[in-house]
Image (spheres, rainbow, N blue to C red):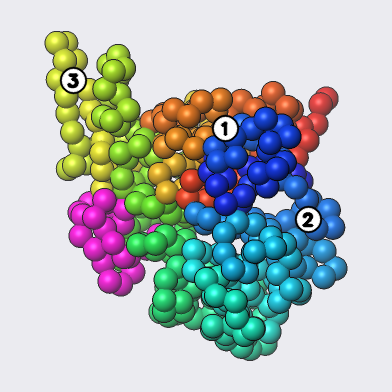
Amino acid sequence: MRWFGFGFNAFEQILPHDELNKEGLSEVKIIRPVELTSQGDGRDCKIRACWSRRTNLYFNSDSCVYVAGFGAVTESCGIVKESHGCKDVFVSESHLTLAFSDRLESWDLQKVEKTPTWSMELNKESSDSPLNLPLLPGGYIATKAPLYRSLSPHLKAKSVAVSAEHVMLLSATGAVYTWGLGSHGQLGHGVLTSEEKPRAVEALWGMPMVCVATGGWHSVCISDGGDLYVWGWNESGQLGLPSRSLRKTLPQQSSPKAGSSSTEETQEGDKHEEVFISIQAFPALLDVSPSCEIMAVSCGSRHTAAVTTTGELYTCGWGDYGQLGHPTLKSTDEPQLVEFFKKQQMRVVDVVCGAWNTFVAVVEERVA
């Protein structure tokens, strides 16, 4: 498995500037996928990303974490010595959290510390279960202090996705719960109010979900049938729905198939009425491409990337730093195929978005 990255690179979280200079590429805006430099034994790893950093957890006999980007712990940009034996990792702008078989540790990335700022021991029952950060036994890791937040065991959480302002929880039964800031409809409850406690997204009730992801002010999830549901802020087209700011000079197009929202904006032409959506307060079913099933999805601050079961990558939203993977810096409110991987006969198997960039895992396409 090989990893590629594109988008915002001001802190060298994708590639060092000197390597880009050799290829004549921009140091800050990488508009075409570039392969990440391998730092471990082999290329198989798990990647996590935030705005200014990227972490690689390498799977080998002595698993460890490599960090690239901004922060005191990465001044020499390399392996985190405290991470040997690590089983999972989660990174935010303020902290790096490492999960081991017997404990959890969070390190302050804005300071050079010899001890973690927070730690928790794991009992044998907890350590026997595979970890899925930011979800922890009895709670989850937030992006801001206090880092540890408790969760009711009645929710039976399977996974958790966190942004700076809101949280999504996927239960073992496939139900979706959201809470936190709701000013842009990102909670999916049909209103723009916030929620202090987890609340079920009623519009999805009865439709089991298998994956959830949060953006800066939007949310997405995948059903067990491979359908993609989106809601929240759409100012930059990150929901894949018509955005007024992106279509001011474009010819009129048909209205989306998504469900109606009380926050939709309309613009009347001579013959047709076009619907623009700045905020989608309810989950909307998004057609990525004809007869297409989604297997993985990730969100940046204002962009979304989805992988199909056939190994293709589609992106939409804000593209000013090249984070959409197209040979342009234009934003788009329609999911578009990233042609690079198909042309290179690569099958996309996973995607991870930082706030302003995107990381993609691929395998070689087998030719019959």
Foreground tag (3 vs 1): 1
* Residue bearing mark 3: 273
Measure the alpha-carbon separation of dots 2 and 1.
23 Å
Is residue 202 shown to the viewer in this render? Answer: no
Percent across and percent down for residue 294 are 54, 40
Q: Residue at x 54, y 83 (%)?
A: 117
Q: Nearer the viewer, residue 46 or 73?
A: 73
Closer to the N terminus: mark 3 or mark 1? Answer: 1
Tag of residue 39: 2
Say what secondary structure mark 2 lies in.
loop
Closer to the N terminus: mark 2 or mark 1? Answer: 1
Say what secondary structure mark 3 lies in.
strand
Task: Indicate whether residue 192 is drawn in magenta.
Answer: yes
Instruction: Give the quadrant of residue 268.
Output: top left
* Residue bearing mark 1: 31
Percent across and percent down for residue 289 are 49, 28
Q: Residues within 10 Å of mark 1 (few under 14, many from 20)?
A: many
Q: Are marks 2 and 3 in contact (CB under 8 Å)?
A: no
**Which stretch appears magenta?**
176-198
